[in-house]
Image (spheres, coloured by chain):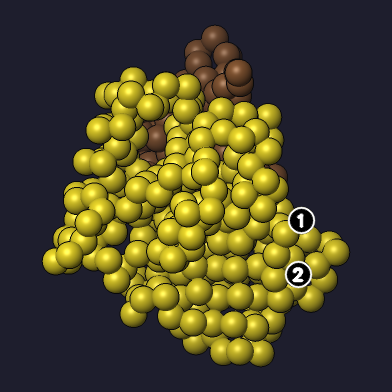
Chain colours: A yellow, B brown
Amino acid sequence: MPSERTAVVVEKRPLTPEVRHVVLRLDEPETFSFQSGQIVQFVLDPKTLRLFSLASAPAALPLIELCVDITPGGRGSQFIERLRLGDRVQFRGPFGVFTVPPAETRPLEFVATGAGIAPIRGMLRGLFEAGNRFERPVALTFGNRRASDILYHDEWLALNAREPAFRYHATLSQPDAGWTGLHGRVTDALPSRKDEFQNRVFFLCGSPQMVDDTRKVLEEIGIPERDIHFEKFF
Amino acid sequence: MRIEVKRDLCIGASSCVIVAPGVFELDSELKAIVKDPNGADAHTILEAARACPTLAIYLYDDDGKQIFPLPPAPTS
Ligand SMILES: Cc1cc2nc3c(=O)[nH]c(=O)nc-3n(C[C@H](O)[C@H](O)[C@H](O)COP(=O)(O)OP(=O)(O)OC[C@H]3O[C@@H](n4cnc5c(N)ncnc54)[C@H](O)[C@@H]3O)c2cc1C
Ligand code: SF4
């Protein structure tokens, strides 16, 4: 039986009209440890389970953060949308294998679209809070429709300015006038950097379609399958 | 190919059921079970195993050799 945890909602704010950033404070943080990128599971009723990625790193404990797109509008979305400050929630976990393996020392390429940034934010925070121990290049390719859809854009710009090893590649499929970044989907943005991709490890997260399209492009570029980690948000 | 769901790892995320509904279903404890090992082609079954967030699905070839999950990549 997975252990049940409880936590209190201490912050909730819209990042966009569709996406919520939720901060929970664990009731018993001493019993909870996780690796950046892992997931937790909310039991909405005995037959209804929903998974959300931890968008924060262990250093933030006793706080954990979620980043949830409520567009699907189903039970999981409604559950998040109804949360109010002070509500106590129950969940299970952590679970999951979408993490940077501790023994992995090679440069890292993160690729996300939309709320797929959630576990990657956790991993990036984990890496840079720990001082990017291996001093390896780390890049984020983040695809969205419009500039106003980019989640945590200021964080990525700040990280890009502060960390010489970090490169931020934001790409928009429906760019606004005045956008000076990349145009197109992540699958358009990646091939132009293929010469940099030798011996890099990829972490992809987003919709099943985006993940599969990106895997295909990376495989065509010659990235071995074992160097492509991914999480699909079903 | 032999398909094994490690029940202790399965959290009922149902990703496998979405990818290969002919092969996997959730039982009353919301754990995945193999209802028909021939309910999809080998590629679809591999994709279902890959989609599992906890890597609870193990695949073996006809000689019993584990084909998924792959051993971790050697690091340089
Ligand atoms: C590993 C993992 C991590 C996730 N992390 C996040 C996150 O950090 N942020 C975020 O916004 N979302 C995340 N999601 C998605 C999230 O769990 C929900 O699926 C999403 O919020 C929609 O839930 P809903 O109840 O609102 O929508 P609904 O569409 O009512 O329900 C979605 C549920 O239906 C199931 N489902 C989807 N498609 C099918 C299908 N074709 N056939 C049968 N069942 C189907 C899914 O398993 C899911 O549980 C994650 C999903 C997974 C698998
Ligand atoms: S995807 Fe994995 S965790 Fe989810 S039901 Fe299937 S085996 Fe279980």
Q: Quadrant of the N terminus of chain A?
A: bottom right
Q: In the drawing, what numbered circle is on residue A74?
A: none
Residues at marks 1 and 2 touching, judged by CB atoms closer than 8 Å: no
Q: Left or right of A234: which side holds B5?
A: right
Q: Residues within 10 Å of mark 1 (few under 14, many from 20)?
A: few
Chain containing the residue with disc 1: A
In this rendered view, identify the residue nearer to me: A59 or A17.
Answer: A59
Could you say which is closer to the camera, residue A133 or residue B2? A133
From what the image shows, is residue A163 above or below residue B75?
below
Q: Which mark is residue A62?
A: 2
Q: Amino acid at mark 1?
A: Ser
Confirm whether residue A229 shows in the render: no
Q: Quadrant of residue A33?
A: bottom right
Compute the Cα span from label 1 to label 2. Answer: 10 Å
Q: Chain of mark 2?
A: A
Instruction: Name the residue carrying label 1.
Output: A33
Residue sitting at 78 percent across and 60 percent down?
Answer: A32
Report the residue that reaches farthest toward the top. Answer: B63
What residue is drawn where x is 67% and y is 46%? A131
**Vertical position of residue A89 compared to residue A94: above or below:** below
> Which mark is first along the chain, 2 or 1?
1
- Label 2 neighbourhood size at 10 Å, few (<14), some (14-19), many (20+)? some
Question: Relative to residue A183, is residue A202 depicted above or below?
Answer: above
Specify whether residue A164 is in view: yes
Residue at x 59% of width, y 82% of height: A11
